[in-house]
Image (spheres, grey):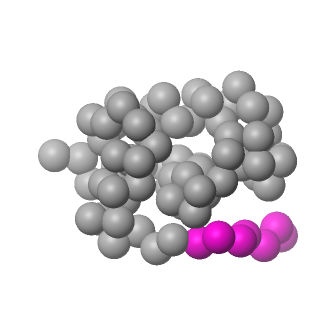
Amino acid sequence: MTTIYELTTRELEILQFVMAGKTNRVIANEVGISLKTVEFHLDKIYTKIGVRTRLMASIWAMQQDLPVQSSFEKD
C-alpha cells in the first residue's frame, strides 16, 4: 500500500491544493507551472495511490493525515 512518503514534494503540494478544492488552473497559477504539468502530476498521484478521482485522492490524503491547506505562501 502506498504511503504519503512515496509522493514527491511537488505531488504533495498539488494534492493539498486538490484537497482544498482548487481547480487545476488555480493550482497552475499558484505553483507557477503549466496546466499540463498539473495534469501530469495528478495522473502520477492517481496512479501511485490507486484512485481515479479528485475526491478519492482527497479522501486518501485525509486518511494519511495530510493537512488541508487552502492558501500557500511563495518564497
Q: Nearer the viewer, residue 54 or 2?
A: 54
67 relative position to 49: left or right: right
Which quadrant would residue 40 be assigned to in this image? top right
The total number of labels drawn is 0
Residue 68 pos. (x, y %): 51, 71
Magenta stretch secondary structure, dominant: loop
Residue found at x 33% / y 57%: 59
Q: Is residue 9 visible?
A: no
Q: Quadrant of the C terminus?
A: bottom right
> Over which residues does the magenta segment extend?
69-75
User: Which residue appears farthest toward the left when viewing the image?
Assistant: 1
Q: Is residue 35 rendered magenta in the image?
A: no
Q: Is residue 10 above or below residue 19?
A: above
Residue found at x 72% / y 70%: 72
26 relative position to 1: left or right: right
Q: Is residue 30 visible?
A: yes
20 relative position to 6: left or right: right
Q: Nearer the viewer, residue 57 or 32?
A: 57
Which quadrant would residue 4 be assigned to in this image? bottom left
Residue found at x 72% / y 49%: 27
56 relative position to 69: left or right: left
Residue found at x 52% / y 36%: 42
Q: Is residue 72 rendered magenta in the image?
A: yes
Q: Is residue 19 above or below residue 73?
A: above
Residue 36 pos. (x, y %): 71, 25
Residue 30 pos. (x, y %): 79, 55
Q: Is residue 59 above or below residue 73?
A: above
